[in-house]
Amino acid sequence: MIRAALVREWQVLLRGRGTVINPIAFLLLTTTLFVIAAPDAMTTAADQSSAVAPGVLWSLVLLTQLLALDSMYRRDFDSGVLEQTLVGAQVPFVAVLIRIFMQWLSTGFIMVGLVPLLGLMLGLSSQALPATALALLLGTPALSLLGSIGASVTVGFNRGGVILALLVLPLFLPTLVFGADMVISAQAGRSVMPQVYALSLISLVALALAPFATLAGLKISLEMQ
Amino acid sequence: MIRAALVREWQVLLRGRGTVINPIAFLLLTTTLFVIAAPDAMTTAADQSSAVAPGVLWSLVLLTQLLALDSMYRRDFDSGVLEQTLVGAQVPFVAVLIRIFMQWLSTGFIMVGLVPLLGLMLGLSSQALPATALALLLGTPALSLLGSIGASVTVGFNRGGVILALLVLPLFLPTLVFGADMVISAQAGRSVMPQVYALSLISLVALALAPFATLAGLKISLEMQ
Amino acid sequence: MLGASLKRLWHKLGSPRWFFSLTTPWVTFFGWSAALLLLWGAIWGLAYAPADYQQGNSFRIMYVHVPAAMLAQSLYIGMGVAGFIGLVWRMKLTDVAISACLPLGMVVTALALFSGSVWGRPTWGSWWEWDGRTVSTLVLFFLYVGVFALREAIAEAELRARASALIAMVGTVNIPIIKYSVEWWNTLHQPASFSLTQKPTMPSEMWLPLLVMVLGFYCFAGFIVLLRMRSEILQRESNARWARDWIVRRGFS
Amino acid sequence: MIDGATLTPQPLLHATALSCERGGQRLFSPLSLSVLPGDYIELIGENGSGKSTLLRTLAGLHSQFTGEYRSQDALYQGHRLGLDGLLTPLENLAWFAGLEDCPSDRETTLDALDRAGVLVKAYSLCSAMSAGQQRRVAMARWLLSSRKLWLLDEPLTALDASAQGLLGEIIAEHCASGGAAICATHNPIDISNKSELILQADKSGARS
Amino acid sequence: MIDGATLTPQPLLHATALSCERGGQRLFSPLSLSVLPGDYIELIGENGSGKSTLLRTLAGLHSQFTGEYRSQDALYQGHRLGLDGLLTPLENLAWFAGLEDCPSDRETTLDALDRAGVLVKAYSLCSAMSAGQQRRVAMARWLLSSRKLWLLDEPLTALDASAQGLLGEIIAEHCASGGAAICATHNPIDISNKSELILQADKSGARS
Ligand code: HEM
Ligand SMILES: Nc1ncnc2c1ncn2[C@@H]1O[C@H](COP(=O)(O)OP(=O)(O)OP(=O)(O)O)[C@@H](O)[C@H]1O
Ligand SMILES: Nc1ncnc2c1ncn2[C@@H]1O[C@H](COP(=O)(O)OP(=O)(O)OP(=O)(O)O)[C@@H](O)[C@H]1O
Ligand SMILES: [Mg+2]
Ligand SMILES: [Mg+2]
């Protein structure tokens, strides 16, 4: 079953090629817009006395995730693939886990590769880049996992987008705080270990919690039909 | 026809009460997140030598619009109301115009009322509040109008959200620039008339362009089925 | 009289076959002109033009940067015009034109951005400055990406054509507004460290090669676009007799 | 006034050499037809022969076709019913009436819902109705419409036996009162005076 | 081994006093049934009587019910077919097979598609198929499934005459080979050995 599910995810990823490119483009685009709208934020950041850039970076990562999450289960819900999964799968749990993993691969994981470019655009100091990449690597799984819960509950609503945001953004808060803090510490040359532990812990808790909660959420959504 | 369409929009607005509350909640929530993530940005803004707050405010307005736009035509598309409108309406053009107008009422127009609260959160100087409200009032119609074009073309995609963002965010840029600039000018005590003209002009151009383009976009989307 | 023949020409232009035979000599023309002009301009600009008294030799990037930046905008406008014609007169050819301009435009825009930032390193002291022209070029790139993403997302050719024509058209209408707004924004907030808007008073030994390079770039674009359009037409018309005949003739001659 | 006018009434739909396309491929061999008031036409063909596409074309929702057609404003009923799930049947019908600019009042609307057998659901949301109940609401809408030409795609779907009978009645009445209907269907509808239009795959395989 | 086992085979589904609810309201009077291998049951009832809800309940997708039921893993086919529009029929069927952990190879899959009459569409995307063609792909999936109990909601929808005949054959074969099927339908399916289950509105009007 795992193999079939992975194959399908992969085929869908290839067919709708946008899935991979679009989050990247969106992240770069919103960063650009933000810098254009508030150029002074970056000027202040450049002298490193202030720490606006890390916060902006993480906020934009959150938003990108949010937009990608909205469509996480929608196609499967509308086409009936979701109900077939819950009725047919020996272990629906695994199917959900695979789905979340692929979602993370096509958003969070890819964003890690964008760190140098984003750092350049936002004026992050280059010494902070490795820590930023690490922070994203450790923090974004939590975003995908927690976001999946919200996506599962809202997939039945047609106006899901905004409600989803209201549900999951508060859950994203810890990741945002520690993630931004890690970048700030790295910029200031301080140790980032506390934040590494914190982000890992959050992601682990999310991993323990999310698949079950998602499954429950999907069942509720399917019953709405 | 106009009356029936307005009645329907109104009923749907009342039924799915979230439509009105959600954008407000989203805007307040993201503002909060942003302030938490990058507190330094606001401190700098408070002494008014810098101009981060207006840019942040407008960026968040753009994002809120974007999220709301995603579902603008989706319900109607999925239920078949859209095809009935195009087949049945004497003047589909008017139906589209009404739809855009209601979308604006339930997002952009409402945001105008939030200006005092947002100003407080972001540390805008109180002398800039009237200009901020005016800027939103003049600028957000352009967002709804141009966004409607993107929404009409992407309503048939299940992964519409991110593509929609790629299509419309670049078009939002002028509004963002002039809108943020208007707030900055007002904060600095300068005249805001040039920006008032610019924003009005953009909204008028969008008004001339959007209904036709939206109609064309909707026809394309309907043919995808 | 003239109107009628113009109209006939217009409708003929819409026919892939006619377009194909019309453009056969033009491909050769553009190809050779591009090769000659680019070679001439490159040698003149890189080897013979005097070094800049302020920037030394780094200014020679200009011979790539400026033509690329100009072409980037022209190609998008070309797409918008093609889109407009396609929507109004329902010509199938215009979509072929859009699909030919799109990748080239993206590459050229990326080239303008890249060459600009390589140039920015010695002159500005940083890879990137937020300045009116940099921003409008960057946004232009995103406009291209938008059309590209849209085309990727629609499977049916006919609908892909109409959707991308519509979006290219809307984007084109907005290009002047975007440029204007960004320039306005730039003059207000960021007294740029190096102003792009003030035309550097160049000696003619410097700008004449630039002119040649610009012409060369446009010929090159014409060559690539025609080539891509023609192969696309052959592919789409592969069932038609004339297309098969042509392929066979080419194959043997 | 002129004699000819009474003898040959204006056709509601007139198509010449019409054939629909998908992906540049013709779906069926070109057909010509003229639909006069009173005609009921059953559109028949295998799965995938192009019935739905033809109806969407006639409704103006599909633009890839060759040949020509002229038609009056039509009432089109596809697989998606056009009922807003957040509204009640009454509200949905009022909106439909507004769309076509035909007068509507609560009385006649309730009558129509009654005839369609969903009066009890008149005040509950359409999203909380069964598949067949939603179809019945759509049928009530046909009753209220003033359009002459009906284009119905598989109207029997999800209807129970009594509703299937009712459907035949409604269409027959409509045709008797000077309307016309084209139904794509796999199971014959019980109407006495029908003509069949059979879609056949295009053998020529021509690409336009 | 034990004689009794051969005399009364294990029921695939056993329900006692089962009734589904929507919004706290009972949809039909409680029913008890036992489905044995070989049974074909036609689920009949007016529009809105609760057929779809009952099938969803038996599939485990609806949890508001009173009474009890035990059942084996089932194959459920509702109004949404579960075909991913971005995949081809072949790919969709491979995924279904993986879901149920039953072996699948290209040969048998193509055979199933051939039998269902959509072999020509094996390599085109499901989103570009007509309503009936998609239903046929779903039918091919039943052929490949190893589940004994089939729960089918209006399986005749959108099928042309030949496919309707095929549907009857497929179900009859399935039942003959030790499976069982419950079909909610308004038009009788052509199977010789059927029993009918008629859903009747709950007169008691009891709210739970
Ligand atoms: C990534 C950074 C840059 C971008 C995106 C960019 C973009 C542009 C654009 C759009 C144009 C206008 C072409 C036209 O006339 O239509 C241009 C022209 C030009 N750029 Fe850049 N540029 C960048 C960096 C630079 C740098 C660092 C320099 C030199 C110090 C430079 C020097 C010029 C010059 C001399 C022109 C021609 C001026 C004129 O014709 O008015 N650019 N550039
Ligand atoms: N989402 C829902 N919320 C509340 N009530 C619902 C919902 N869906 C259906 N109902 C009600 O439950 C009852 C049974 O619906 P169901 O879809 O099971 O009927 P059905 O027998 O399948 O009818 P049909 O023949 O029309 O398909 C109907 O009376 C309907 O009004
Ligand atoms: N979106 C699409 N893109 C490309 N081809 C399509 C699309 N939808 C349908 N087709 C093809 O067009 C043909 C006609 O489809 P159409 O839906 O009109 O058939 P139909 O006669 O209504 O069939 P059915 O009886 O199954 O409803 C089919 O062969 C199908 O494969
Ligand atoms: Mg059909
Ligand atoms: Mg049902």
Image (cartoon, coloured by chain):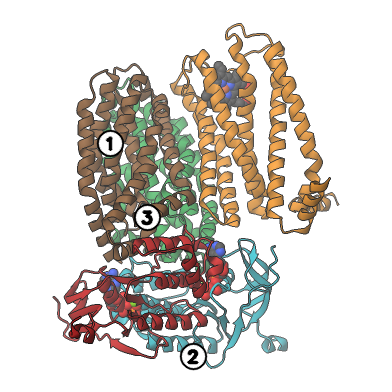
Chain colours: A brown, B green, C orange, D cyan, E red
- Label 1 is placed on what type of residue? Gly
User: In the picture provided, is A11 more to the left or to the right than E204?
Assistant: right
Which of pointers 1 and 3 lies earlier in the amino acid sequence?
A: 3
- Label 2 is placed on what type of residue? Asp
Q: Are marks 2 and 3 in contact (CB under 8 Å)?
A: no
Helix, strand or loop at disc 1?
Answer: helix
Label 3 residue near ligand 3, CB within 8 Å: no
Q: Residue at x 41, y 27 (%)?
A: A116
Q: How many marks?
A: 3
Q: Residue at x 37, y 23 (%)?
A: A42
Q: Which residue is mark 2?
A: D190
Q: Which residue is mark 3?
A: A5
Q: With respect to residue E61, does A176 lie above or below?
A: above
Q: Which residue is mark 1?
A: A139
Q: Residues within 10 Å of mark 2 (few under 14, many from 20)?
A: some
Tell me where residue D16 appears, x and y as whole percent.
69, 74
Tell me where residue C156 appears, x and y as whole percent.
57, 57
Tell me where residue C70 appears, x and y as whole percent.
63, 29
Rounded to the nearest angstrom, the CA distance separating label 1 from label 2 is 64 Å
Rounded to the nearest angstrom, the CA distance separating label 1 from label 3 is 25 Å
Q: Quadrant of residue C36?
A: top right
Could you tell me if residue D98 is visible in this image?
yes
Q: Residue furthest front?
A: E1
